[in-house]
Image: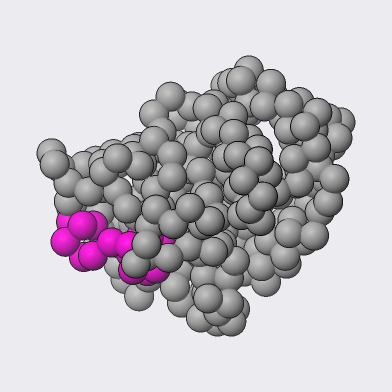
Amino acid sequence: MGLEIPELESMAKRCRRNIVRMVYGIGAGHPGGSLSAIDMLTGLYGHRLRVDSDNPKWSDRDRFIMSKGHASPGVYSILHERGFLTEDDLASFRKLGGSCQGHVDMKWCPGVDFSAGSLGMGLSFGIGCSLAAKLDGSDRTSWVMLGDGELQEGQVWEGVMSAVHHEIDNLTVIVDRNGIQNDDFCETQMRMFDVSEKFASFGWAVMEIDGHDMAQVVDAIDWADQVKGGPACIVMHTVKGKGVSYMENNPKFHGAAPNEEQFILAMEELS
């Protein structure tokens, strides 16, 4: 699409409103990590990803893997913007038989390329997608978003090592470094210290950005496209619950819905 920065920022705000609406509508879901990730999702889908809503299974499409699959409201909101989902689909969030299940699921939702649930598996899947593209002689790329709490999973680091060994340069990892996981702040649960340094020590090209600065988001996406000879990692520093005052940096809204009063306030703040 190649949208301009102001258009991307407007799209991200619309997505934020839909994220809150979905979670409020069913009284459950994960708003915090969706709101922290949505600026990058908007940048990817509005600026870079080669996808086609009229042909969701197009073999040469780029792949996006949301490894922290509970951030599904963020994925569904941007897929709605790109024409994969309707308003009725969004209204089916977490409902039996609906397109928009609680965790992203490629069997139910057009435009989703990875069925998530257990954390730590998305990078391995993305490596497989990238290697398959090379075997097919395709220039399609794979983009994997990981949560920072998810980095505590050992399988992630096996994948980090494998991607460098295989010199996979059509793969980018995006770490949503919002500092909060399911139960508490990451620093309380399990400190990860310098994430960028860890990826770099394995041989990855690494860039750190403010994940809520759309110009930096777009620049990082373009940078990742130019990395050759191995994989790229974008570590984006974000605020969990970004855009809704009482959700920001609040572990309670990792997996909680707003009440009616809170919903009204969120819609005012996101207007």
The image shows residue 12 at horizontal and vertical percentages of 46, 68
Decide which of 141, 15 is in the foreground and name it: 141
Q: How is the image coloured?
A: one colour
Residue 87 lies in the magenta-colored region: yes
Decide which of 142, 8 is in the foreground and name it: 142
The structure residue drawn at horizontal position 59% and vertical position 82%, both measured from the top left corner, is 4
The structure residue drawn at horizontal position 51% and vertical position 80%, both measured from the top left corner, is 7
The structure residue drawn at horizontal position 56% and vertical position 44%, both measured from the top left corner, is 145
Q: Is residue 33 visible?
A: yes
Q: Determine which quarter of the picture holds residue 40.
A: bottom right
Decide which of 192, 259 is in the foreground and name it: 192
In the drawing, does residue 28 fall left or right of residue 219?
left
Q: Which residues are magenta?
A: 77-91
- Check the image and report above or below for 226 versus 95: below
Q: Quadrant of the C terminus?
A: bottom left
The image shows residue 230 at horizontal and vertical percentages of 81, 42
Residue 45 lies in the magenta-colored region: no
The image shows residue 190 at horizontal and vertical percentages of 62, 21
The structure residue drawn at horizontal position 43% and vertical position 65%, both measured from the top left corner, is 52
Q: Disc count in the image?
A: 0
Furthest residue toward front: 136
- Check the image and report above or below for 264 versus 9: above
Decide which of 115, 138 is in the foreground and name it: 138
Q: Is residue 130 visible?
A: no
Furthest residue toward top: 154
The image shows residue 203 at horizontal and vertical percentages of 86, 35
In the drawing, does residue 234 fall left or right of residue 114?
right
In the drawing, does residue 184 fall left or right of residue 131?
left
- Name the main secondary structure of what is drawn in magenta: helix
